[in-house]
Amino acid sequence: MSAINWRMPRWFYQMGSPKWFYEWAGRLQPWFAGSAFILLLWGMIWGLAFAPADYQQGNSFRIMYVHVPAAILSQSVFMAMAVAGAIGLIWKMKVAFMVARSCVAIGASFTAIALLTGAIWGKPTWGAFWVWDARLTSTLVLLFLYAGVMALNQAISERQTAGKASAILAIVGSINIPVIKYSVEWWNTLHQSSSFSFTEKPSMPAEMYLPLLLTVLGCYCFFSLLVLMRTRTQILQTQSQTSWLAAHRDIRGE
Amino acid sequence: MMAFVMAIVKRDLLLILRQPADILNPLVFFILVVALFPLGVSPEASILAPTAAGIVWVAAMLATLLSLELMFKLDHEDGSLEQLLLAPYPGWSLVLAKVLVHWLISGLPLVLLSPLIASMLFLPLHALPTLMLSLLIGTPTLSLFGAIGAALVTGVRGGGMLLTILILPLYVPVIIFGAASVAAAVQGMPIDGYIAILGAMLVFALMITPWASSAALKL
């Protein structure tokens, strides 16, 4: 059986060690922080101040530069959480559960921002803060799924068990993600279809979608930064008894 | 393995028959919730009839939730759950047995009660078979997805409230297509598509939930 000899690359196993992850994340953090800062600043200034106004919506369309990244991230973060949880269950990695736990509050915040900005934009454009459209409803369900994972994490005090339980819930809940993604195509309701796809040219002119692309990428970098920071905090909380941490220069302050 | 499943089903049914309040309470709750709508919204047939399908589905879902917590709780408390998991049979067969029992005591009575409830809400008679069919296919899905939640909160303090938060989002697709099938039947539209999707969800739930619940039980 050749399948038995199949291995994940070495760095993958090394990431399972809190010590390795802590140092690796510490080295990556400044890069994500820098690129998030540059991309978000560049994209936001370009999008909010210089991109041409929409011929129908005027300037109100500019909320898209917050709404679309938040909505894209709300789904990506849930997938990241489910994948991290699955890695934790399959390879029994503590760090993976910590990553999944870090994702919950960030993803819930992005979902809330997406719903809120959508409501603010919807009032002048659709004439209502909220409609029971397929995509809006499935995004609301996504927020409830985040709330469930959060509640489960809080209810179980033992971190390892909480991580496993939340991982199972996240994996089952990720069924909702394709439903959100394709809701606009399957049901063809009020919400417009996706801004970006890998196969087609965007329906907007370049000076409108390039800033959007920058803010989306910036949000991904910002999310990565937050996950690394929050996971490092959890490592500090749970590994405080270990000798490598006591000897680490971050702790000794050198 | 079939013998193992049947033995658990028999044992659990016997235990429940000796405590009939456990089955009757969710059913009384089901009728009570439905009775609140004419009182709270309007007793007019013109308002109740179009909403009847949704009300019955929501009430059925809440009644299912109410009895879910007991699925593994008692066995966990007296320690027999641990023994059952140690038995030389896969964990999912245990979960399937528990789900079957849960459906027999909560889902099936709801299906049988639905004609009564539907007539209380003035649902047109020609839509009644669709309501019963959609409940017949939909309630096992509710029990199956509920098993994941019940397994996750087993042994967790304050599990009942937590269970509802975990499980209700997963129930959303079932209620959408369940209620939509009845609404279509009321208007005389074809229902095959809705019923097919409900069936697909049942098959999907049968595939993944016993596995996921048994993983959750073994945490």
Image (cartoon, coloured by chain):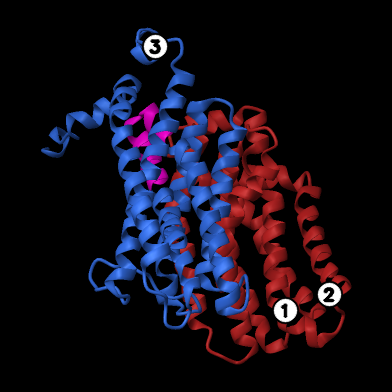
Q: Where does the magenta region start and end?
A: A80-99
Colour red, chain: B
Identify the residue under disc 1.
B51
| Residue at figure coordinates x 85%, y 84% from the top left | B44
Give the crowd class for mark 2: few <14, some 14-19, many >=20 residues within 10 Å: few
Q: Are marks 3 and 2 in contact (CB under 8 Å)?
A: no
Identify the residue under disc 3.
A253
Mark closest to the chain's N terminus, 1 or 2: 2
Rendered colour, chain A: blue
| Residue at figure coordinates x 67%, y 61% from the top left | B61
| Residue at figure coordinates x 24%, y 32% from the top left | A12
Where the C terminus of chain A falls, by quadrant?
Answer: top left
Q: Which tag is nearer the camera, tag 1 or tag 3?
A: 3
Q: What residue type is disc 3 on?
A: Gly
- A96 in the magenta segment: yes
| Residue at figure coordinates x 67%, y 53% from the top left | B65
- A57 in the magenta segment: no
Q: What residue type is disc 2 on?
A: Val
Q: Are marks 1 and 2 in contact (CB under 8 Å)?
A: yes
Residue nearest the viewer, comparing A221 with A37? A37
Identify the residue under disc 2.
B41
Picture disc at residue A4: none
Q: Chain of mark 2?
A: B
Vertically, is A156 above or below B178? above
Q: Chain of mark 3?
A: A
**Quarter occupied by residue B175:** bottom right
Task: Kindly report the secondary structure that dominates the magenta region of the rendered protein.
Answer: helix
